[in-house]
Image (cartoon, helix red, strand yellow):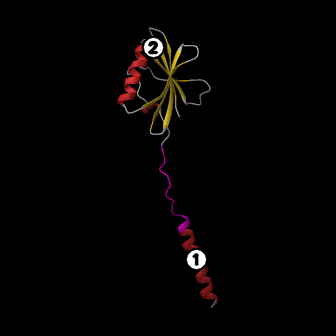
Amino acid sequence: MVRLAVLSIMLALSVGTALADQPVPPTKPVTPPATAEQFPLPKDAKAPSAAPGGGGRIQVYEIPRGRDAVITEVRELLKKSGWTITKDDPSPSGRAIRLEVKKTDKVYKVSFTGDATRTALILTLP
């Protein structure tokens, strides 16, 4: 009788341990973190530099062309790539254009500063 009780306890412990080792499937699909590679950039954009204090989420791209041409090109690239522009406003100073764009529930913020010869595209990842 004692032997049967000990055997039952050992069996229960081994089944419980085996079940505990099974991975639990996620209840919601895991979304990979957003990356700059997912954002359509002009081909002549130079490698990004990280903005100070941005924690790696803010990247600055230098483009050797005028700001207005770059903004027009990026708007077209976004449209062709299936992005939605949710905001498109000048900064209060008027020296920058700010876009807020969305694709697959991820919102990116983009600012364009510069002049007729060069542009800085500032990309903030979600």
Query: Closer to the camera, 23 or 92?
Result: 92
Q: Position of residue 13 (x, y in %)?
A: 59, 74
Residue located farthest toward the right when viewing the structure as drawn: 2
Write down the quadrant of residue 76 in the picture.
top left
Q: Position of residue 86 (x, y in %)?
A: 48, 30
Q: Which residues are magenta?
A: 19-31
Question: Is residue 30 in the magenta section?
Answer: yes
Type of amino acid under label 2: Arg
Q: Nearer the viewer, mark 2 or mark 1?
A: 2
Residue ID for mark 1: 12
> In the figure, 4 relative to 65: above or below?
below
Type of amino acid under label 1: Ala
Estimate the spatial distance between the alpha carbons at disc 2 and disc 1, rounded to whole Å: 70 Å
Q: Position of residue 85 (x, y in %)?
A: 45, 29
Which residue lies at the image location 52% right of the left edge and 60% below the top edge? 24
Residue ID for mark 2: 67
